[in-house]
Amino acid sequence: MPESTTNSSPAPLSAAFTPAHLKFLNAKLEKLSPEKILEWAMISLPGLIQTTAFGPTGLVILDMINRIHIDQQAAANVHPTPASSSASEDEEDDEATSEQKRFQKSGYNTRRHPVPLIFIDTLYHFQETLGLAQRVQDHYNIPLKVYKPLNAESTADFEREYGQNLWETDDVSYDYLVKVEPGRRAYQELGAQAVISGRRRSQKGDRAKLEILEVEKGTGLLKLNPLATWSFQQVWTYLRAYQVPFNALLDQGYRSIGDWHSTKPTSNLEDERSGRWEGKQKTECGLHVDYFKMRAEFQATQKKKQALLEAQQAAAQQQQQGQQPQAVDVC
């Protein structure tokens, strides 16, 4: 049974944030632009990573991080002013030099992208999404860290183990196997303590009351939502203004893009995620819900399946031996 190793995780960064402190920070962050929120996070939050499926908001965040990084590189390479400056200027120079050294020490003066970028490849993404992932890597020169379902490199591998259309027969197990477990494995391997997400309040559902900085229930992982206050139109305007690569499906009526089997174009401008999981009482895929609760549900489902399989095997064996099969309660 796929499991993420969690025992060796470092103490959660969120332990340093009391509810009162978190409330205070969110009140301050609400007044900042997304760029300033990201700049603060890149300096203040160790173990910071970004997860993305290359949706519009995630692409805006990626571009903002890249621009901040370029500005920080430029600042780190500025030479101090001559020694003949006034005392106040000398103090400013000392502060600037100190700031430069801090960025240099943290690695911001190098060419590498400062925030690790994670892509959860569910094996069921649109081809347009996979093509965009490559274009983004080329455009920003970013090494993308790809995580797939455990022991599955292809759709055939996954379906050989779990069968076809698992999202229809057991969507809890599907979400856990293709999204939650790979995501948790990525956080563990990369030592993530804070994760940047592309969620926004205007996406409604469980996201309507989203805070900019929050603590994930169960794991204590910090979640940063720098564009929480933005609308879809603001995101779209940014993509166009800065010529950010985006998914070609957006021009075909898609607004929120996930796996091909659970995503459709939508004309509902009031609810951009209405094209996801049509006909289901579902608004999240599992990446932003209680991890331990979802793992427990997955394990319970697997136990029931195993019990049913054993019962069926026992019944078949009894029939082969000419015996009357006994009823087995697997509930």
Image (tube, rainbow, N blue to C red):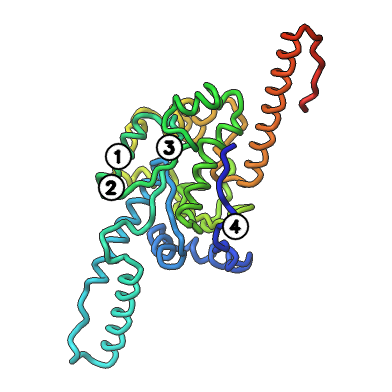
Q: Which mark is residue 241?
A: 2
Is mark 3 in CB contact (under 8 Å) with mark 1? no
Residue 117 horizontal/vertical position (percent): 38, 50
Tell me what residue is drawn at x 52 percent, y 21 percent. 164
Answer above or below: position of 262 versus 118: above
* Contact? badges 3 and 4 (CB < 8 Å): no
> Residue at horizontal 22%, vertical 74%?
78
Mark found first going from the N terminus, 4 or 2 = 4
> Residue 111, image x and y in percent?
26, 59
Q: CA distance from mark 2 to mark 1?
A: 21 Å
| Residue 262 sits above or below residue 315 on the image | below
Sequence-first disc among 2 and 3:
3
| Callout 3 secondary element | loop
Inter-mark Cα distance, 2 to 3: 29 Å
- Mark 1 residue element: helix
Mark 2 vs mark 1: give the one in front: 1
